[in-house]
Image (tube, coloured by chain):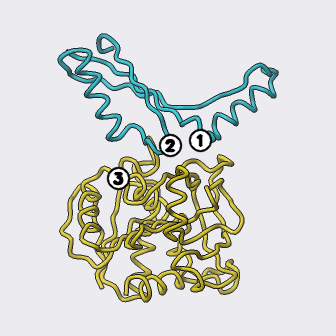
Chain colours: A yellow, B cyan
Amino acid sequence: MKAGILVFPGINCDNDLKLVLNRVYNFQTEFLWHTNSFKVEHDIYFVPGGFSYGDYLRSGAMASRSLSLRSLKDAVSKGIPAVGICNGFQILTEASLLPGALVKNKTLKHIARWENLSAEGLFKNNFTEDYALPISHSEGNYLCDDNTLKELIENEQIIFKYKKNPNGSTENIAGIASKDYKILGLMPHPERAVFEAKDWPKNNANFGKLFFDFIFSKIYS
Amino acid sequence: MRFTGVVTVNFKKSVLEPQGQAVLLSLKETGHENVSLVRVGKHIEVVIEAENKEDAYDKISKIAEELLYNPVMETCEIQILNEAR
C-alpha cells in the first residue's frame, strides 16, 4: 500500500503518521507539499493535524484552497479514500469534502487530554467500551445545520462521539464519514496513540492501532 | 482605479460565539449591565484594482465567497470605500 500524506506549513503530525504507516503497517509513504499538485497514484491519503497556515482566517481555510487539495479532490472523486485528523478534519470540511465546520471550543481553551469515545455508524461494535484517544485542539466544536445533522444521523455518518462533550460539539460529534465512508474526519489523534509512552494509562497505546487496524481491514480492505 | 473594500465577517446569530460571550461577561462584571450582546467578528480590508465601485464590489464578493468567510457558520458584509487608503 502506498499512502500520500498532505503537508502544509504549520502541520506537525505528518511524521507521526508516517512513522505509524511505515513501521506498523509497512506502507510506503510520500509527503505531498501544498504548493504542488500531485499525480493520483496512492491507495489512500491522509491530511494530518497541526496548524496549517497558522490557523489564520479560519482553521483549515487556506490549506483547503491549496494546489494539493485540488489534487486530493480529484483523487476522492475517483474513489480513493482520504482521512483527515484534527486540522486535517478542519481542512476537509473547509474544502466541502465533509459537511459542517469546526469552530472554537466552547471553553475558549486549547484542550489536550485523553477523551473517552463511543464508536458509531460502521465503527459500532468494533471498539472497546473503554475506548479513548488523545485530543489536542482549540477548534474542535463541530457545527452544522439541522438538516445536515439529520442526514448525518440517518445515513449513519457519525463515526465517533465523545462520551463527555469537551468542546461544545453538536451531538457530541468527534468524527464523521462521508456518505460512502470514503472520506473520514476526526478530531482525536489515533496516530499519537500507537506507540507506548511511560505516563499513559495502561493499554491506551493500543487504541490508536485499533483505529488503523479497523479502517485498513474493514473499511478500506 | 484602486478601491478599498471592507469585509465584515461575523458568526451567524444561531451560532454561540464564545469570544463574544466572554467579553460580555467581562463587561457585565465591570458594571456595564446595560450591555446585552457582544459578538466578536473579523474586519478584513482588501485593496483591489477595479473599473468602478460596482466592479470592485463584485470582485470582492467573489473573493469573500471563495475564501474570506464560511457560509456554514458565518455571515459577510461588504462595504466599498471610494478610493484606496
Q: Earlier in the sequence, mark 2 or mark 1?
A: 1
A165 on left or right of A23: right
Measure how far apart labels 2 and 3 are at the Cα level. 16 Å
Q: Nearer the viewer, residue A202 or A97?
A: A97
At 25% from the left and 28% from the top, the residue drawn is B59
Q: Are marks 1 and 3 in contact (CB under 8 Å)?
A: no
At 33% from the left and 71% from the top, the residue drawn is A45
Amino acid at the residue labelled 1: Val
Amino acid at the residue labelled 2: Met
Could you confirm whether marks 2 and 3 are on the same chain?
A: no
Q: Mark 2 packing: few (<14 Cα in 10 Å), some, or many (20+)?
A: some
Is label 1 or label 3 in front? Answer: 1
Locate residue A84: give its quadrant.
bottom left
Residue that carries the numbered disc 2 in the rendered image: B73
Residue that carries the numbered disc 1 in the rendered image: B15
Q: Nearer the viewer, residue A141 or A178?
A: A178
Picture coordinates of residue B54 (x, y %)?
A: 25, 18
Picture coordinates of residue A71 (x, y %)?
A: 23, 62
